[in-house]
Image: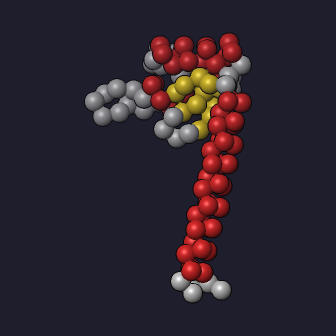
Amino acid sequence: MEEHGTIRRFDKSVPHELKLTLRMAKDNGWWIYQRSTKKWFTPQEFQNEAFRLLVKEPGGHMNDYDFVPMNPWDGLRRRVDYLQKVMTETIEFSRRLEEHYKANGIFK
């Protein structure tokens, strides 16, 4: 990456697929999601940090497949849905624990 003021620009060392990922995110007003870390990056953050985020994996392949342009509102909605699911499961588990221990005379 080359420095241009405070903004780094993609150079030849950045895989073409990542340039397309960044372009798609910018064109659609989306952000970029990193699957392995479950982190979100604005297009500007991604452009500034791509040199740090890109790693060569065993076998010599870059991890460019790990980055996906996505609508951040969809990502937020999925997280809320996941939290609701976890909360429902936790409440049910807690209920079962209480029933079990009450039935066995441990809880009163």
- Frontmost residue, 95 versus 59: 95
Residue 26: image quadrant is top right
Q: Position of residue 48 (x, y in %)?
A: 61, 27
Give the residue drawn at x 66%, y 42%: 81
The number of discs equals: 0
- Frontmost residue, 90 versus 61: 90
Give the residue drawn at x 56%, y 80%: 103
Q: Is residue 24 above or below residue 83?
A: above
Can residue 29 be seen here? The reply is yes
Give the residue drawn at x 63%, y 48%: 85
Q: Position of residue 78 (x, y in %)?
A: 64, 37
Q: How is the image coloured?
A: secondary structure
Left or right? Give the position of 51 relative to 70.
left
Give the residue drawn at x 61%, y 61%: 92
- Frontmost residue, 59 versus 2: 59
Q: Position of residue 38 (x, y in %)?
A: 56, 39
Quarter placement of the C terminus? bottom right
Can residue 8 be seen here? The reply is no
Q: Is residue 67 above or below residue 90?
A: above
Left or right? Give the position of 59 relative to 88.
left
- Frontmost residue, 30 versus 85: 85
Q: Position of residue 34 (x, y in %)?
A: 54, 33
